[in-house]
Amino acid sequence: MKLLLTSAGLSNDSIAKSFEEMVGLTGNNVKIAVIPTASNVEEGDKGWLIKDYQNLKSRNYQVDIVDISALPKEIWLPRLEAANVLLFEGGNTFYLMSWLKKSGLDKLLPELLKTRVYMGVSAGSMVPTVSLRMSTSQKTYSEQTFPLDNDNGLGLVNFHIRPHLNSEFFPKAREEFIKEIAKEIPEPIYAIDDQTAIKVVDGKPEVISEGKYLVYNQQFV
């Protein structure tokens, strides 16, 4: 299984290079199904989302937009199957997880990802982890929650991610806050800024960065 978990998408050449190496294709041969569902409940300017789309199109990738909350399975599933990358966008982590479960995509992903790359942006990088505790913790995050039976993530990787390290838009994404929550969470935590990504191939994580990142509980990686 191959995953590229980012804070802000293909924000620099190092991340883009790793992305193409994972996909094994370049340019118009890269077919990306973007799942924007997490952004649906976010208010205000969506310039960050538009910028992600622009970064993809600037590299001449084929981009389809597939909202699993707006389409029936018989429409969204063939479009995901036609892609070689499934890109889960940023927004609200809980809303995205709730729709992954409602739609049944959470159960289909392991099979789909045998032949496709999972790419996450922000919330899309948090749902594949062990749990959503980095989102539920008021020490590091403060999201509107949506009903879920538990705070389990998809469990596709054995660590946690805190995106947007040191971002002006996320005042609690700071070392002093993350260090405290790391005392409560036994699994590894990667706190990454918008110039950093975690590349995971067959369960092995590798940091790709032109920025800054922090790693906690690394002995368990």
Image (cartoon, rainbow, N blue to C red):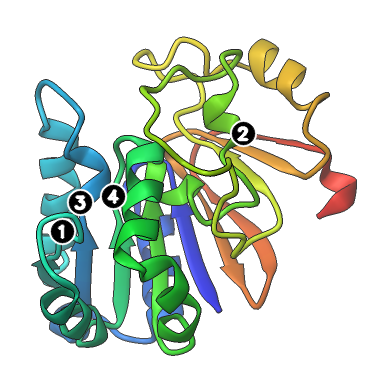
Q: Are marks 4 and 2 in contact (CB under 8 Å)?
A: no
What residue is shown with label 4? 89
Q: Upstream in the sequence, badge 4 or badge 2?
A: 4
Q: Label 3 sits on what residue type? A: Pro
What residue is shown with label 3? 36
SS at circle 3: loop
**Percent from the top left, x then y, of residue 64?**
10, 69
| CA distance separating discs 1 and 4 | 10 Å
**Percent from the top left, x then y, of residue 215?**
72, 38
Quarter of the image for residue 18 reads bottom left
| CA distance separating discs 4 and 2 | 19 Å
Q: Label 1 sits on what residue type? A: Asp
Q: Is residue 190 left or right of residue 164?
A: right
Q: Label 2 sits on what residue type? A: Arg
Query: Going 76% across and 27% down the picture, which residue do you hit?
Result: 182
Does the rendering let one see residue 43?
Answer: yes
Q: Upstream in the sequence, badge 3 or badge 2?
A: 3
| CA distance separating discs 3 and 2 | 22 Å
Q: Of tags 4 and 2, which is closer to the observer?
A: 2
The 10 Å Cα crowd at callout 4, few under 14, some 14 to 19, many 20 or more, is many
| CA distance separating discs 1 and 3 | 6 Å
- Front residue of 167/126: it is 126
Q: Are marks 1 and 3 in contact (CB under 8 Å)?
A: yes
SS at circle 1: loop
Q: Are marks 2 and 1 in contact (CB under 8 Å)?
A: no
SS at circle 2: helix
What residue is shown with label 1? 67
Quarter of the image for residue 151 reads top right
Q: Is residue 1 above or below residue 95?
A: below
Quarter of the image for residue 76 reads bottom left
What residue is shown with label 2? 133
